[in-house]
Amino acid sequence: MSATFWITLTGLLLVFFTLAAYATLAERKISAWIQDRVGPNRVGPWGLLQPLADVLKLVFKESFQPASTYRFLQILAPVLMVTLAMGALAILPLSPHLSLFEGSIGILYLLGVLSLSVYGLSLAGWATASKYSLLGGLRSGAQVVSYELALGLALLSVLLLTAHHLPNANPLLPRTIVEAQREAWFVLINPIGFLIYVVAAFAEANRAPFDLVEAEQELVGGYHTEYSAIRFGAFFVAEYMNMITASALISTFFFGGYLGPFEEALGVSTWQPIWQNVWGISWLLAKTLFWVFVFIWVRWTLPRFRYDHLMRIGWKVLLPLGVLNLAALAGLLLVL
């Protein structure tokens, strides 16, 4: 592989880990703002070194592991969660000229990676040989599988629109999806599909009000009850990575990804490739950070759903609505 690939990969990973670390600080700052508090302000100016302090604390804490656990699987589970969270970003087009992978099965790869996350949650619950963790893992697996169906239907509506706008291009490529939105973002054309995808993304990322995966009040600590120190920190990092990944995917599929406003008037297509890369990455990052804010805002605004309500929304509301939206969209495009 070329040097450009490795430089891009290294830079993306550094940015991704930095965003995940400071997403924890943003969570605490925004929650403090919403609740009229101060938030972290002791470590560094304005508390900017708080994520570093959190990492050092987790690294140097003693890692407790019960004797009855399946040791290899208990170590594998958090590593798998972090790896899958990073793997989903591999297909994202960062700009018109920059992306990590240009394979022909982009969306299929994404669905495969998302479906594997249930293994990390289930393994974490089962490997600790605790009935509380096992119940948490089983409930988390049921939640993720349930909302993957609605998410897949919303993605199908995106692929349908992409194939309609660019019939000679491969609709499975995220770059094709972005380019199909040059005339109008898909959120304007397909608002129901957008709402279904966003709700399913909240559930897939285990964010409130769908955070039944780790509901401390009900399940002690969910699937990671018996985890401590850096192993618990890995699950914590994976959650914020999933939130950033979900935000980037929402921006790509429904808000034009790296496309910015007034590109034709500004003549962006005539710029040097390096400046087009800077333009595209900046807009994708701005849209992603906006959706990270929305994820945090919703967490500190809405209460957690009851588990039967959560499953009812997935199977009796989102799934039928996704089928109807896909059928209506297909019929409309057929007429047009």
Image: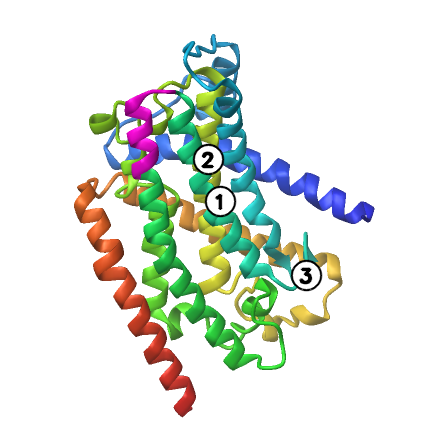
Q: Are marks 1 and 3 in contact (CB under 8 Å)?
A: no
Q: Earlier in the sequence, mark 1 or mark 3?
A: 1
Identify which residue is drawn at 71% across, 46% down.
Answer: 8
Question: Residue 276 has which mark?
Answer: 3
Q: Main secondary structure of the magenta part?
A: helix
100, 223: nearer the viewer: 223
- Where disc 1 sits, the SS reads helix
Report the amino acid beneath label 1: Leu
- In this view of the protein, which residue sits in the foreground, 65 or 321? 65
Instruction: Look at the numbered disc 3 and give the secondary structure of its residue.
Output: helix
Q: How many marks?
A: 3
Labels 2 and 1 touching (C-beta < 8 A):
yes
Comparing labels 2 and 3, the label whose residue is closer to the camera: 2
Comparing 85 with 243, the one in front is 85
> Residue shown at 53%/34% (left/top)?
80
| Residue range (magenta) | 129-139
Question: Which residue corresponds to the image point at 20% horizontal and 42% vertical from the top-left?
Answer: 307
Vertical placement of residue 6 versus 233, above or below: below
Residue 167 percent location from the top left of the image: 58, 82
Q: Label 2: state its secondary structure.
A: helix
Q: Residue at x 69, y 39 (%)?
A: 10
User: Mark 2 vs mark 3: which is more N-terminal?
Assistant: 2
Which mark, by number, is residue 120?
2
Provide residue 140's location: percent of width, then percent of height.
33, 39
Which residue is at the front of the view, 279 or 201?
Answer: 201
What's the residue type where badge 2 is placed?
Gly
Q: Is residue 294 visible?
A: no
- Residue 239 visible in image: yes
Instruction: Find disc 1 in the rendering and name its residue.
Output: 116
Q: Amino acid at mark 3?
A: Gln
Residue 281 located left or right of residue 149:
right
C-alpha gap between disc 1 and disc 3: 34 Å
